[in-house]
Image (cartoon, helix red, strand yellow):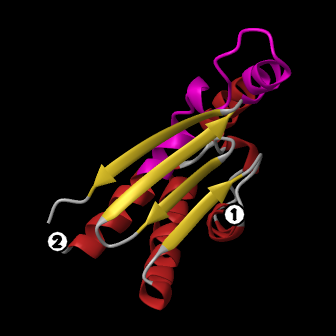
Amino acid sequence: MNSKVKSIEIATEWWVDRITNPTREFFTSKKKNDSITTAGNIAFILAQEESEKLSKKQIEKFHKNLSEYIQEELQDNGICKLETKLYPTNTLNKAALSAGIEEDLFPWETTMTITNEQVEVLNVIGGRKRLHPIKVKR
């Protein structure tokens, strides 16, 4: 498997995992009693409930379409950025809508940068930046 194919697969699997297994850390800040944490806890609970309703067909369609969209962007630009604010934007939103996946399943304030060599995830929530670099092994 070449590095471009590997980076696409890593990126796609990461997003599939986020929507099928939501984690609190991508919705809340470290502060105990701030408004972001309160809203994030509610969003996290809703994401958990919505993730249980996803069908295998929806997940497969999202995976397939997102892979294709990432490949197109890498081919055209050499880089692909997938982002969420409170909801997914651009390419990520297009893949979600094409599979009938609810926008509220996606983690907040997350940016994934994909190249042929690396997949990097930055999550900024409640003033906290977490970088999750993933090296693509050739």
Q: Which residue is located at x 55 percent, y 62 percent?
A: 62
Q: Which span is picked out in magenta?
A: 14-43
Instruction: Give the left or right position of residue 127, taking residue 78 as reference.
Output: right
Q: Quadrant of the C terminus?
A: bottom left
> In terms of secondary structure, what is the magenta stretch mainly?
helix
Q: Which mark is residue 1?
A: 2
Q: Quadrant of the N terminus?
A: bottom left
Which one is earlier in the sequence, the residue at label 1 or at label 2?
A: 2
Residue 88: which quarter of the image? Answer: bottom right
Front residue (pair 67, 41): 41
Residue under numbered circle 1: 93
Seen in the picture, residue 107 relative to 138 is either above or below; the reply is above
Q: Residue 132, how many percent across, how many down?
A: 41, 43
Q: Residue 112, how many percent across, how many down?
A: 52, 57
Q: Judge the density around disc 2: few (<14), some (14-19), many (≥20) Cα neighbours within 10 Å.
A: few
Seen in the picture, residue 49 relative to 107 is either above or below; the reply is above
As shown in the figure, which amino acid type bears the numbered disc 2?
Met
